[in-house]
Image (cartoon, helix red, strand yellow):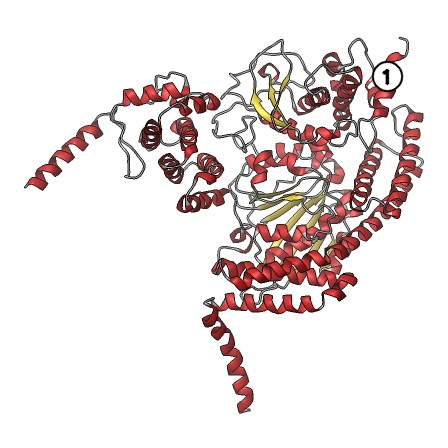
């Protein structure tokens, strides 16, 4: 019981002691300690995070939070060397997981594109399309074009994106033929 | 006794000076230098402005030619510049120039002080003092921007003072007092998002909400949703409490833009965060929402303009609600991204993150964006490129004078002929439609594969000379390759649709021909570019008059022939031009 009480007392004293040592406020010390803890952990797990999108995403959240905590430390002590070094380390780690996150973003976008292609196919196949529906179809074409373009800007040789670009052109040709048949009207 | 006689003499002198209207004295010690000889001071002011005036301070309250004044100030000695700066501080503090009556004079005095302060030193202190004393928010903001541009001439203390002023108008933090109450303890916050059918069809709001542990309820109108989302802050100090967000995603724009009321809650303190998340329609989507917007009661808010290229809406929204913290998109924004970014932002607000930290989140993929720099935040200087607070048609990034009392020229739709303007253009007419047209046209031209490289190359530059026989817009190339656009006041009556169509034509021929004589292909592209916006904004009624002015010389075509081959993907293309060529080659 006594030793447990001692542990509690020591833990309670740890933050004020650290605050006294660093010259930071108790809150500043907590921010610094938490940032250090998270960055150290992520640094150890960085290889696993690079190959696991879920881990990369969690690491990104923790690194961004750590950077925010360190901002608070630097607001108190602009020349805090430890905070500056940890900020740098967090940036390096963020850069390491960025390609993994980008791959996820591209994969997500390709799912969105596939959905949108399906919607456009249905809209084009509709036997009747009023002016509002035609406007919406054109909006969807605009969205599709931009989304495909964005993926190809990041990965010019992405096979799926190239296929979607061809699909989009084919759908647009169909739409144009429908428009032409009606001479400016909407099918 | 000696002291007493000195004091008496001083008091007598002060009493004499105070009784004499010709001698303005500084209200407080500082940078102000007494104006001992008003006639001399007025002479100096008139020399600088290149004008005369019968008011107490001569031409100070008149229409100031900033460029001319800058040149003339540059020719003054350093001593004279310092003296004038101090005397301008005195003049600004003159009770006769207080309030709205003296606003134009104070605005010009601040602009002159800015020119005088360009070499730093005491005139810079004078500008800082005048800015700090200025109570009018428009002028205080203008002075803050002017000072910010001079930061490379400042010492550490001056930088600190200037930064504090700048932050008043371009805050580093979201308005947390408005969101969480003055004591910061509010734990339930409303958030309204205005959308339409595609917001729901593609926004994934329900699944994104559920992924985040939120509850979702379907409500009216249409497919509207009510989402309840509780966020536990990531805060090692334990100071922050969990926040429950009550989000309404409203299905309003499905019924057309005319039924959309995106600004209806701007005066309601119970709705501190709002967003528009639907199509931009090339910059016309919020037209009716703005027309029906309630007059500002100066509440602090966060408003996210979340359509594609929504910076086109920023200047007008900022003018209507200057106290609102605006976030706007720079490029395309997808419904898929908006839901994700909003959940990330609510998390950020719960953590009381500053704008820089929120921007960092977005740049790191927190919004699911491939485009990592698509939001322009309230603390950013680059927004000055699209803002035009005084509506003189010159972006805030280059404007040093806040023009007061500008008249909005009455619109005359579908009329591209020259008319007499209702007021003198310089310092008299609002150039809001020019500012808007330049932003909208820059965005639209960006979609064209034939002329898309011109996007962002054109910058508004206010009114040009009145010339009934001249072009609507004139273009001057800058050393950095951009073009400054001035509007002819004879065409101040052009409405938004006509302005954007005419400007697209002008930008295309000027940009593609690099200011020279355009080829037939370039003329065709220019005609088609304007036709595109008429087509997109239901402006077929403008076609006859547009074609008279901007058609292909010697040919009259139906609008359909010009727009038929404008590509959904790449706007005006080589194929568009070739197709129109076949049409003009057809007999009859």
Q: Above or below — where is A80 with respect to B524?
A: below
Residue at 28% in and 20% down: B39
User: Is B577 on the left or on the right of B548, as rendered?
Assistant: right
Q: Position of residue B552 (x, y in %)?
A: 78, 13
What is the chain identity of the residue bearing mark 1? B
Please provide percent x and percent y for residue B310: 67, 38
Towards the viewer: B200 or B536: B536
Q: Quadrant of the N terminus of chain A?
A: bottom right
Q: Secondary structure at mark 1?
A: helix
- Eyeballing the image, is B334 above or below B574? below
The quarter holding residue B265 reads top right
Q: In this figure, which residue is indicated by the disc labeled 1?
A: B581
- In the rendering, at what x and y percent does residue B316 appear? 59, 33
Residue under the point 62% across and 9% down: B469
Which residue is nearer to you in this view: B75 or B369?
B75
- Name the side, left or right, on which B254 lies relative to B403: right
Would you say residue B237 is visible in this rendering?
A: no
Residue at 92% x, 36% y is A170
Q: Which residue: 81% across, 31% down?
A: B570
| B200 or B373, nearer to the observer | B373
Residue B451 image-quadrant placement: top right
- Quarter residue A146 falls in: top right
Residue B372 placement (x, y as % from top left): 69, 47
The residue lying furthest to the bottom in this view is A1
């Amino acid at each position: 019981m006594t030793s447990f009480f001692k542990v509690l007392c020591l833990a309670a004293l740890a933050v004020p002691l650290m605050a006294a040592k660093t010259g930071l406020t108790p809150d500043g010390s907590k921010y610094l300690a938490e940032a250090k803890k998270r960055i150290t952990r992520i640094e150890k797990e960085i290889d696993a995070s690079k190959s696991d999108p879920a881990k990369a995403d969690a690491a990104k959240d923790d690194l961004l939070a750590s950077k925010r905590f360190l901002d608070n430390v630097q607001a108190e002590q602009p020349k805090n060397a430890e905070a500056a070094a940890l900020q740098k380390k967090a940036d390096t780690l963020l850069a390491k997981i960025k390609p993994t996150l980008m791959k996820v973003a591209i994969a997500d976008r390709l799912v969105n594109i596939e959905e949108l292609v399906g919607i456009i196919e249905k809209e084009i196949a509709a036997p009747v399309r009023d002016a509002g529906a035609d406007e919406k179809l054109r909006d969807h074409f605009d969205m599709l074009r931009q989304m495909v373009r964005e993926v190809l800007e990041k990965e010019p040789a992405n096979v799926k994106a190239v296929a979607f670009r061809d699909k989009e052109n084919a759908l647009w040709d169909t739409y144009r033929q429908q428009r032409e048949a009606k001479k400016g009207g909407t099918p | 006794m000696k002291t007493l006689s000195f004091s008496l003499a001083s008091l007598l002198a002060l009493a004499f000076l105070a009784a004499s209207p010709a001698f303005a004295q500084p209200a407080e010690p500082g940078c102000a230098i007494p104006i001992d000889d008003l006639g001399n001071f007025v002479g100096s002011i008139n020399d600088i402005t290149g004008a005369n005036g019968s008011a107490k301070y001569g031409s100070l309250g008149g229409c100031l030619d900033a460029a001319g004044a800058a040149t003339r100030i540059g020719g003054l000695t350093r001593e004279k510049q310092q003296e004038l700066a101090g005397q301008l501080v005195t003049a600004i503090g003159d009770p006769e120039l207080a309030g709205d009556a003296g606003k134009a004079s104070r605005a010009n005095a601040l602009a002159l002080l800015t020119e005088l302060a360009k070499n730093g030193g005491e005139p810079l202190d004078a500008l800082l003092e005048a800015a700090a004393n200025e109570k009018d928010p428009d002028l205080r903001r203008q002075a803050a921007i002017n000072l910010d541009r001079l930061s490379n001439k400042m010492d550490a203390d001056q930088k600190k003072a200037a930064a504090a002023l700048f932050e008043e108008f371009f805050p580093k933090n979201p308005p947390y007092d408005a969101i969480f109450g003055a004591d910061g303890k509010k734990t339930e916050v409303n958030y309204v998002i205005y959308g339409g059918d595609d917001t729901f069809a593609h926004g994934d709001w329900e699944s994104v909400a559920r992924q985040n542990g939120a509850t979702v309820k379907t409500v009216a109108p249409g497919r509207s949703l009510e989402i309840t989302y509780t966020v536990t802050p990531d805060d090692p100090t334990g100071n922050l409490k969990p926040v429950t967000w009550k989000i309404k995603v409203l299905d309003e724009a499905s019924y057309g833009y005319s039924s959309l009321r995106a600004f209806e809650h701007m005066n309601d303190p119970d709705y501190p965060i709002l967003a528009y998340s639907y199509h931009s329609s090339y910059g016309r989507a919020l037209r009716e929402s703005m027309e029906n917007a309630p007059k500002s009661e100066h509440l602090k808010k966060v408003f996210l303009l979340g359509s594609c290229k929504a910076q086109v809406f920023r200047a007008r929204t900022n003018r209507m609600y200057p106290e609102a913290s605006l976030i706007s998109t720079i490029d395309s924004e997808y419904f898929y991204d908006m839901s994700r970014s909003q959940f990330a932002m609510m998390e950020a607000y719960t953590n009381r993150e500053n704008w820089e930290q929120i921007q960092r989140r977005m740049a790191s993929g927190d919004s699911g964006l491939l485009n990592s720099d698509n939001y322009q935040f309230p603390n950013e200087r680059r927004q000055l490129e699209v803002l035009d607070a005084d509506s003189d048609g010159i972006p805030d990034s280059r404007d040093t004078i806040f023009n007061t009392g500008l008249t909005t020229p009455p619109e005359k739709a579908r009329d591209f002929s020259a008319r007499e303007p209702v007021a003198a253009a310089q310092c008299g007419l609002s150039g809001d439609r020019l500012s808007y047209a330049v932003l909208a046209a820059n965005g639209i031209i960006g979609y064209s594969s034939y002329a898309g490289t011109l996007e962002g190359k054109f910058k508004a530059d206010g009114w040009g000379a009145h010339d009934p026989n001249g072009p609507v817009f004139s273009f001057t190339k800058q050393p950095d390759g951009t073009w400054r656009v001035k509007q002819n006041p004879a065409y101040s009556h052009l409405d938004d649709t006509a302005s954007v169509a005419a400007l697209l034509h002008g930008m295309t021929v000027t940009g593609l021909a690099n200011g020279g004589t355009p080829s037939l292909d370039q003329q065709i592209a220019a005609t088609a570019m304007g036709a595109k916006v008429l087509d997109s904004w239901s402006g077929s009624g403008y076609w006859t008059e547009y074609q008279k002015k901007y058609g292909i010389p010697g040919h009259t075509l139906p609008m359909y022939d010009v727009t038929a081959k404008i590509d959904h993907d790449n706007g005006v293309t080589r194929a568009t031009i070739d197709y129109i060529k076949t049409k003009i080659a057809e007999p009859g």
